Amino acid sequence: MERVIKIFFILLLGVMVLHAQDNKEIAKTVQKATQRLQLKLILSDEQTTKIKTLVMDNYKQVKENKTTALETKITSILNDKQKEKFIIIKKDWMSSLQKN
């Protein structure tokens, strides 16, 4: 019985380590993508933070190419000039998020 508990603990620890690595990679990808968006759209720090949070919260949908809701939420944060630019670059920007 003790041996089974040790094996279970080792497996659980392994899964936790893998999950933590995945989260780090996701955070790194989202950070790079939001920085690119900040430069292209001239976002304020507040806008950048909000968009980064939105992307992190909706990353599963991004990976599944279900981005319509996320695009709408991002657009609501932008001013009119930024919205125009976002419409032009959003396809490439979203695909950069999906590559990870």
Image: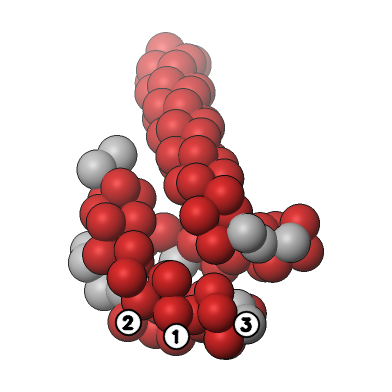
Residue mark closest to the camera, 2 vs 3: 3
**Residue density around tag 2, few if under 14, some if 14–19, many if 20 or more, within 10 Å:** few
Q: Please name the residue shown 24% across and 43% down the image.
A: 99
Can residue 15 be seen in the rendering of this structure?
yes
Lower sequence index among marks 2 and 3: 2
**Residue where numbered disc 3 is placed:** 79
Foreground of the two, 5 or 14: 14
**Residue where numbered disc 2 is placed:** 68
Where residue 1 sits: x, y (%)?
A: 43, 21
Q: Please name the residue shown 44% across and 85% down the image.
A: 72
Task: Indicate the amino acid at tag 1.
Answer: Thr
Specify the farthest residue to the right: 46
Secondary structure of the residue carrying numbered label 3: loop
**Residue where numbered disc 1 is placed:** 72
Position of 90 with respect to 75 (left or right) is left
Q: Are marks 3 and 1 in contact (CB under 8 Å)?
A: no
Where residue 43 sits: x, y (%)?
A: 65, 62
Can residue 16 be seen in the rendering of this structure?
no
Task: Indicate the amino acid at tag 3.
Answer: Asn
Residue mark closest to the camera, 3 vs 1: 3
